[in-house]
Amino acid sequence: MRVPLSDFGRTSGLLAVVVVSGSALATADGPDHFRLRAPAALRAEPRSDAAVVRHLPDGGVCLRNLGCRAAPRSSGEPWCRIEHAGQQGWVEARRLAEAACAQGVPPVIRGRLRGYEDVDYPLHGRAGQTLSVVLRARHPQLYFNVLPPGGEAAMFIGSQTGDRFARTLPADGIYTVRVYLMRAAARRNERGAFTLRLGLVGTPLAARDDAKDARVEGTPYHATALLRCARGDAAPDPPQATREGDLTRLRIGDDERIEVPDALLTGG
C-alpha cells in the first residue's frame, strides 16, 4: 500500500456520480482519490478472477481515480481503475470511498502488515532537508527501507542497519519509506503491527545557476563535511572500513573511529 504524504492531488470540488446496482459510482469526473473501505486486490482486469497486480491492505488511501465503469455481465459490481504506487489496476467500487489525499507528514503513523504486504509512505523532500525515521515493532522481522527519488535501490536497508534513520537529503524529489516483513516471516503469512515516526526538517538549499561553479561560499571547495572521530591509545591493528548509507566508517584499533561522508569525497 502506498500512502503519499505531501504535495499530492486534492479532492475535486464537484463530484459526478451515477448509481449502479445500488452503489454510488464515481465517473472520470469524480474525486481525484479514493480510500479503501476494506482490504482488496488490485487486478489487471475489472473482474474477480483476473490476475492480481498486488494486494492492497486495509486502510489504503490516496488511490488515484482513473475512472469507473459498470460491471461486466459476469459480475454484479461496478469496478474502478486506480493508480497505486505507479501501478494501475482495477478494484471493485464497493470497496472504495471518496477521500482527500492526506497533506503533510503525520508525526506518528500506526499500521500493521501481514505476509507479503508492504506499506509505502512517499514524501516530497528537498535537498538540504533532514529526513528522520524511527520504527517501533514487536515483530523481530519487521523493518523499513528508504528509497531515493526515481529508484528501487534502497539508500537505507533496515534489516542490515537498524530501526533508525536520519540523513540530509542530497536532492529534491519523492523519497519513499517502505515498511515490510522479511521473506521468512512473509512466507509463513505472519502479522506485525508497527509505529513509525517521520520527520522532515531544515531549510532546503537554494537553487544555483547551472552556469556557475557550485563552490561553497567563501571557499575554493565544492563541498564541506564534518568528520566525527574518537581517539584512544595507539593500536597496531590495521584500519577497517565499513559502509552505512552515504558514510564510510573507519576504525583503527579499538578506540579510534572516523566517519567520512561521501559528500567530502565526491563533492556532494
Image (cartoon, rainbow, N blue to C red):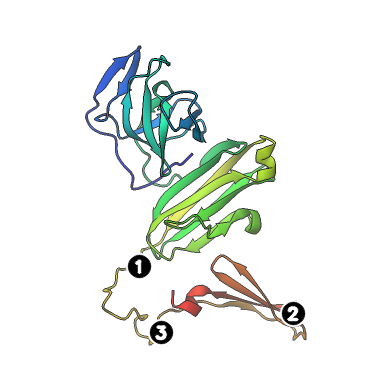
Q: Point out which mark residue 52 bears.
A: none
**First reached walking from the N terminus: tag 2 or tag 1:** 1
> Which of 245/54 is in front?
54
Identify the residue at image location x=64%, y=53%: 159
**Residue farthest to the top?**
22
Q: Position of residue 210 (x, y in %)?
A: 28, 74
Spatial CA distance of label 2 from label 3 is 32 Å
Q: Secondary structure at mark 3?
A: loop
Spatial CA distance of label 1 from label 3 is 17 Å
Figure label count: 3
Q: Which residue was labeled with disc 1?
A: 205
Identify the residue at image location x=44%, y=24%: 47
Q: Point out which mark residue 253 bears.
A: 2
Spatial CA distance of label 2 from label 1 is 38 Å
For the residue marked with disc 2, what is the amino acid? Answer: Gly
Please give left or right for residue 38 compared with residue 83 in the image. Answer: right
Q: Which residue was labeled with disc 3?
A: 221
Identify the residue at image location x=42%, y=47%: 105
Q: Position of residue 231 (x, y in %)?
A: 68, 81
For the residue marked with disc 3, what is the amino acid? Answer: Tyr
- Could you tell me if the residues under marks 2 and 3 are in contact, i.e. CB atoms within 8 Å? no
Residue 105 visible within the image = yes
- Could you tell me if the residues under marks 1 and 3 are in contact, i.e. CB atoms within 8 Å? no
Please give left or right for residue 84 compared with residue 28 in the image. Answer: right
Identify the residue at image location x=53%, y=48%: 178
Q: Position of residue 51 (x, y in %)?
A: 50, 31
For the residue marked with disc 1, what is the amino acid? Answer: Leu
Q: Answer few, some or many: residues within 10 Å of disc 3's Cα (few below 14, many 20 plus, some between 14 and 19).
A: few
Q: Answer few, some or many: residues within 10 Å of disc 2's Cα (few below 14, many 20 plus, some between 14 and 19).
A: some
**Residue farthest to the right?**
236
> Which of 7/42 is in front?
42
